């Protein structure tokens, strides 16, 4: 009878250990975006998506093995004699976790091998389609609230014309993501801002006449920015 009781206690302890281990596995991914099956979402470079409240203490071996090694090799803290027990301070309310920072991707509008458009055009090129396909693949298993597509032009030409072109390019990107990547249209916002927000620095590209040299210098300003805002992660 005594032997049976010892075996029962050993089985109960083992069950408790397994339960704690399973719980630990469940919570170790809290700093990363996961899909509906609990797998960590990764981009096309096999990099894990971190949430906006990720800290090094949340690192897991699958995504940040180097951080795990640093924690494992850190010297153990020195122990000291326990201090006399004191009354626990009143607990403070836990602040809500801040939403993840928006993820912004910038595409060249018309001046690179994978540019979205031809110069002064608003139809998505085959190379641009491949770039957008890659972007959409990264979003496949992520929960997002809104995608903001912003078209930019350089400062050459009238603001009225540039505003129209930048808006047309943003609309073209939205149409492609909706049709080819099945992104819900109501989750995509578009706007054109012409050349009011340049990337080039003042005085970097001199002149106002549309010469080949000036057009090439202002190439970074001609772009489309796609910003993904996420306030929740997959369960």
Image (cartoon, rainbow, N blue to C red):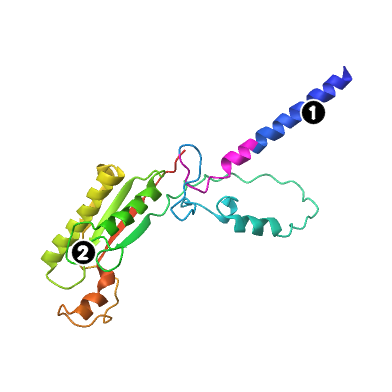
Q: Position of residue 182 (x, y in %)?
A: 30, 42
| Mark sitting on residue 10 | 1
Secondary structure found at label 1:
helix
Going from N to C along the chain, the mark reached first, 1 or 2, is 1
Tell me if 52 is positioned left or right of 88 in this view: left
Give the CA separation, mark 1 to mark 2. Answer: 72 Å
Quadrant position of the N terminus in the picture: top right
Residue 26 magenta-highlighted: yes
Q: Residue furthest right?
A: 2
Determine which residue is flagged by label 2.
118
- Residue at 74% from the left image edge and 27% from the top image edge: 12
Pick whichever, 81 or 112, lies toward us.
112
Q: Position of residue 197 (x, y in %)?
A: 25, 68
- Residue at 28% from the left image edge and 63% from the top image edge: 115
Q: Where is residue 58 in the image (x, y as percent from the top left)?
A: 57, 50
Q: How crowded is mark 1: few (under 14 residues within 10 Å), some or many (20 or more)?
A: few
- Res 205 → quadrant: bottom left
Q: Which residue lies furthest to the front in this view?
A: 126
Give the residues in magenta: 22-35
Which label sits in the foreground, 1 or 2?
Answer: 2
Q: Where is residue 82 in the image (x, y as percent from the top left)?
A: 78, 50
- Residue at 17% from the left image edge and 66% from the top image edge: 120
Residue 41 magenta-highlighted: no
Tell me if 148 is positioned left or right of 164 in this view: right
Whether residue 198 is visible, yes or no, is no
Q: In this view, does 36 lie above or below 41?
A: above
Pick whichever, 88 or 180, lies toward us.
180
Whether residue 136 is visible, yes or no, is yes
Cβ atoms under marks 1 and 2 closer than 8 Å:
no
Tell me if 161 is positioned left or right of 42 in this view: left
Secondary structure found at label 2:
loop
Q: Is residue 179 above or below residue 124?
A: above
């Amino acid at each position: 009878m005594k032997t049976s009781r010892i075996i029962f206690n050993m089985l109960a302890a083992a069950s408790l250990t397994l339960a704690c281990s399973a719980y630990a596995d469940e919570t170790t991914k809290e700093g990363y975006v996961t899909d509906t099956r609990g797998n960590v979402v990764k981009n096309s470079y096999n990099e894990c998506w971190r949430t906006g409240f990720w800290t090094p203490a949340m690192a897991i071996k699958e995504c940040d093995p180097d951080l795990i090694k640093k924690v494992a090799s850190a010297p153990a803290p020195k122990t000291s004699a326990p201090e006399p027990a004191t009354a626990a301070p009143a607990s403070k309310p836990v602040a809500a976790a801040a939403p993840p920072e928006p993820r912004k991707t910038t595409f060249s509008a018309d001046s690179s091998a994978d540019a979205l458009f031809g110069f002064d055009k608003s139809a998505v090129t085959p190379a641009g389609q491949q770039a957008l396909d890659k972007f959409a693949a990264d979003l496949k298993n992520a929960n997002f609230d809104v995608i903001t597509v912003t078209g930019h032009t350089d400062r050459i030409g009238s603001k009225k014309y540039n505003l129209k072109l930048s808006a047309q390019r943003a609309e073209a990107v939205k149409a492609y993501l909706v049709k080819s990547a099945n992104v819900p249209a109501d989750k995509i916002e578009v706007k054109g801002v012409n050349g009011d927000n340049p990337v080039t620095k003042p005085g970097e590209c001199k002149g106002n006449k549309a010469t080949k040299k000036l057009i090439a210098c202002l190439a970074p300003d001609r772009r489309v920015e796609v910003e993904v805002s996420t306030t929740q992660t997959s369960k």
